[in-house]
Amino acid sequence: MTNAVRGRPRWGAVARKTGGHLVRGLVMVWVVATISFVIIREIPGNPVLGQYESLIQKGMSPEQAERATAVLYGFLPTGSLWQQYLGYMGSLLHLDLGRSLSTPGVEVTTLIGSAARWTVLPVLAGTLLSFLLGVTMGVYAAIKRSGKLGDMLALSGSLLHGVPVYVIGLLLTAIFATLWPILPSGGPVDVEFVPGLNPGYLGSLLQHAVLPVVTYTLASYGGWILAMKSNVVAVLGDDFILAAELRGLKRGIVFRYLARNAILPLFTILALSIGMLFGGSIFIEEIFNYPGLGLLLVNSITSRDYALMGGTFLVITIGIVVANIVADLLYTAIDPRVRSGGAA
Amino acid sequence: MTVIINPEGVADPQASPARTTRATLRRNFWRGVWRVLRRKPSRMAGVVIIVLFALMGIAGPLLYPDNLPRDDNALYAPPSLAHPFGTDFEGTDVLALVVTGARYVLLTGLATAAITVAVGTAIGLFAGFRRGRWDTVLMRLTDMNLAIPGLPLLLVLSTVWKFEGPLEMGLVLGLLGWGGIARAVRSQTLSLRERGFIEAARGLGLPTRHIIGRELLPGMAPYIAMNMLIAVTGAVYAQVGLFFLGVLPFESNNWGVMLNLAVFNGGALTTPAALPYLLAPLLAILLLTLGIVLIVDAMDEIFNPRLREE
Amino acid sequence: MKRLAAIAALAAIATATACGSTGTTDTATAGGVYTTIDGSKQINASAPINPFNPVGSVFSGYNGMALAWPKNDPIDPNQYYPAIASSWTVSPDQREVVIHLQPNARWSDGEPVTSEDVRVSIGLAYTQGGTAYALDPKAAGAAADIQVVDGKTIRITQGANRSSMFLSNLLSTVVVPAHVFGRLLPGDFWSTLKLAQTGSGQAAERAKSRITGLAEKVIGFAPPHDVSAGPFVLERVNPGAALLRRNPYFYNSRAIAPDKVKVLNYTGNEQIWNYLISGRLDNAPFTSVPTAVMERIQEARGSRVVRGYSPVSTAMAFNQAHKPYDNAHVRRALAYLIDRAQVTRIASPEGGTPAATTSGIHAKAARAWLGDGFDRLDPYRVDPAKAAAELRAAGMVLRGGKWAMPDGKPWKVQIHVPASFSDWVSAAKSISSQLVDHGIDATVVTAADYTLYLGELADGKYDVGFWLIGLGPSPYNIFQRLFGQANGWQMFGGRLRHVAPGTEGNWMGGPQVVDAGADGRVDPGELTARLNFASPQEQKQIVGVLARIANQQVPVIQLWDYVNTQFVNTSRYTAFPPDDDESLRLSSGVWMQLGMIKKRQA
């Protein structure tokens, strides 16, 4: 990092850097797609037999179950592994993820599209909410770090960061859906309302999203408060603060300086966690029966829906890869020291 | 989201001290530890909790017979003196299940942490130390590791792979999770490098092994140790969570299996009857988390003097 | 930061007001909304409204109609309630069935339901395969000829290889509107079908593959909106639920009380428990319920339990190709050691009754089939002394309180179950604890999911695993679980053959011919296959032999017989079917068609 350039970034360099990131990102997606393809084809178990026995287990008569599953044999992949792989890669180039087996006859992209809607909404809301909350509380925790309040805040952050998300989810369901049933659990919206911008539908949408969003917020709030606290503590040691204190600058100005400098590095983490959100939260979606990508992946695994499994996995990975690129670029924009040179 | 403890402010290893002062330093260090612990009694509690869990993992299964006794007439019995956390679906004491189940859980956690830290540190150090082509290749590998969605992959893997014991489980979790540490250790190494004292050591003709072992690692050790503790909790959650989802095959009793059976077989979220069966392993997880959080907090202050305000 | 806080506060207020304004649904009308769950399918908002699609948004009994609905008879599979078919006659030799349609049946767009609709539905069923509509003329019970007699009458003739299941398979045919689905069948479909069924050589093969090639198109067909002949018609579906509204053209519309039906999706039983406790469901299908949860559900206002017969039993099955389970003495010894009452109490207290013995048949059906013969079967009461004698007879040795293999090597019983079935997991745990008490080293090993479990089971990787048996009412289906494909007997193109253990899914690995005492040496798989076309008297005799073989050879240990435990809530609707009603395994929609379920009068 000897040739660090200060000042405005040169656009040519930025474009080159972005291009490099994109190429690396594509390679990464290809590698992950290949790995997941191989693993997925290795999964033992016959999907048709599995579905047949599950139907019987649910009380269907053998004839009925046979009628419902016999046709699925036509949907199983054929040909050698290598042929299947070439076919898969070929259709990937056309953004075609193939057809689902568990929802036979439906395109995987359609299924992923409708599930993505239900993942992005609550997880994005949860991420942003926890970010706001965590960052604000983090500043307090840092300033008052020797007081009782700061201690409590920091400890609450550590604990919430430590407690697994399923524990929070289970406890919230136990309280708000069972013991004191004021919130619905299960499904994204009451089907009685006509979808659209009417108060009934939106209200029901919000009502159903409350528990997943709160769970997600609580689960990620701890991370933000911890990160913000340690950043603020680091900034507090800066010369500027020292000088400001000596000169007796207004508290507001000091606070703004503090917040801005401590918060900037967090934006890269924010970008990363927004990328992660495509993975949804498998636990949250499972516990609240929320039909997002995580639940889609779990269901595709249990039904051995190879195309759907691969597609969901790929979308989740692409989300992460893109977020990594964005985070890297953001980091470059924020921290001039890494603007050029040095592999970041 | 995982937060890697900020490497900022890790004690500088510049003070490559003479042998004579090492002992004094060490004494001072332990005195510092004691002082930090004493300043907040909660930190002592953390140490006590962790020691307790360690004992549970080592000696727990020895306290009970190989096959835990059952009481056919006390299925899901409420808490009592004989059964402080009630009994499970076949009348086995829940506390006994928690104690005997600890070893599996903790062993996985330790194995994961050891692998995460070993692989992450090795790759990070090597990349940061060598730079150049090695750095590029290793960092691409790290990016890949970070880009693979862990939990979804574990779900897929659990059908392909038989996770037969805690160590195997730990191996997989560890191999999935080293990316964060590798990246942080690399940037740490780079920044130490930038301060020029690696070149200085080189100039003095010190061997690479010495530079890494004596100059770089000691400075990063506390940071690595903290991350190791955090990796333990991460592994415990991932593992208990997978058992809870019911996607891992199990042979022996452990906390995740208890959660799964309590919720899906006992209806613990629906009725209070099986609640103690659910709460006991949850409480164990919370306690373990609390203990580790408190110790990390103490370590943070010991090694990161800026956090001290006085 | 301040601005953000203000926005957050505003959003919170908006949320609160929006949540407060519930109840303004567009469905608050006289008949009310009937809320239930369809246990047989996951609701999938992306799936087409098409009954041929396994997850299509067509709910049996509501907007999905068959020719008739099966009664829950313990032994006769040909008992049906009329639906689209108002009546039917069968020729004495069972070759020919004449079906008369409901004279007033109409689709929800006002079009009448005609013989042509049934013919098209049958044609579409051929593309999907299945017993009555197999393209292979040699397959037992295939429909060979379909004749439209008039607009409301249709005659169907069975092929040469007859099956006693023909009527039953025919009547459960799903009926779809020809004016919506008809265009899926190409113009020359019926001549192609004729060629496939009666032709020979290449031409017939080509015709067959043309017809099966239509399957994917049929299954993926997505009509723009629902056209139903049932009491309801689909209004909308989202990933959490489906909403159906009343079909004014339904032939028995006056009998239908609710204006709307809401079918909720679920991902786990515990969600159904929660719905039941909060009293949200008017009816829930069978779900396994722990005792404590049962108590809370019964505390809910209006909550009532309806119990009936469910022709399914859970058994612990052996892989007889593995030692020492190849020895009937060992299998019998284990049967003498397992306390089935205790296992049932732990695993399925509300949804099962401990199996009276191992016969391969659910106790209720067994009584009807076997009469007094049922009492003459060995009941396998817990008897450690008998078990020890059997183990010794098998050459097993008792060393230091632990049983070991005849060669002195340790004997480890590994009981495999899928992790997702919590009742099986706890049953297996209970069994392993009991066996340990009797000096047998037993453990439980779970598989990550059911598909994986079935795959490994079929590959012969397990010694002992759980298996559903006694799938009545057809006696062939009952014994096909013990002496069918899983045990080496394969039915292909109407011919039976036996494959060696460990191949082609034969994981039970039993002998092809067994010594059945007074009945001589018999081939149980061959006997089972014969149940398909035997006369009722012959069937009774064969079932007797097979039950005795199951009882003596113990290819499985029958653990508990399921009870169809359903929940209904009488605070909004009344007149639910009583206990043991023959309609209990059908959906609420069918109950309504049959004149049950009335709005509670305030």
Image (tube, rainbow, N blue to C red):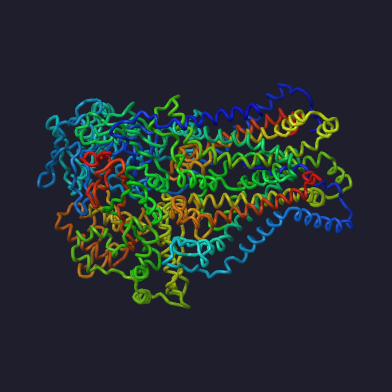
Q: Quadrant of the C terminus of chain A?
A: top right
Q: Nearer the viewer, residue C36 or A183?
A: A183
Looking at the image, residue B151 sits to the left or right of residue B185; the answer is left
Who is closer to the viewer here, A287 or A302? A287
* Nearer-the-camera pick, A97 or C1: C1
Depth check: A310 or A94 in front?
Answer: A310
Locate residue B64, reporting x and y percent.
55, 69
- Residue at 77%, 30% (x, y): give it: A251
- Give the left or right position of residue C84, taking residue A339 as reference: left
Which residue occupies the extreme front position in the image? C602
Horizontal side of residue C251 vs C9, given as left or right: left
Residue at left offset 22%, top offset 25%: C110
Residue B115, position as x, y percentages in the image:
65, 52
- Left or right of C258 in this view: C161: left
Answer with the quarter of the image where residue C60 lies: top left
x and y, in percent, of residue C247 in the image: 26, 30
Q: Is residue C34 visible?
A: yes
Percent from the top left, x then y, of residue C563?
Answer: 30, 55
Q: How many marks?
A: 0
Residue C31 drawn above or below residue C347: above
Residue C285 appears in the figure: no
Image quarter hosting the N terminus of chain A:
top right
Q: Residue at x 30, y 40 (%)?
A: C572
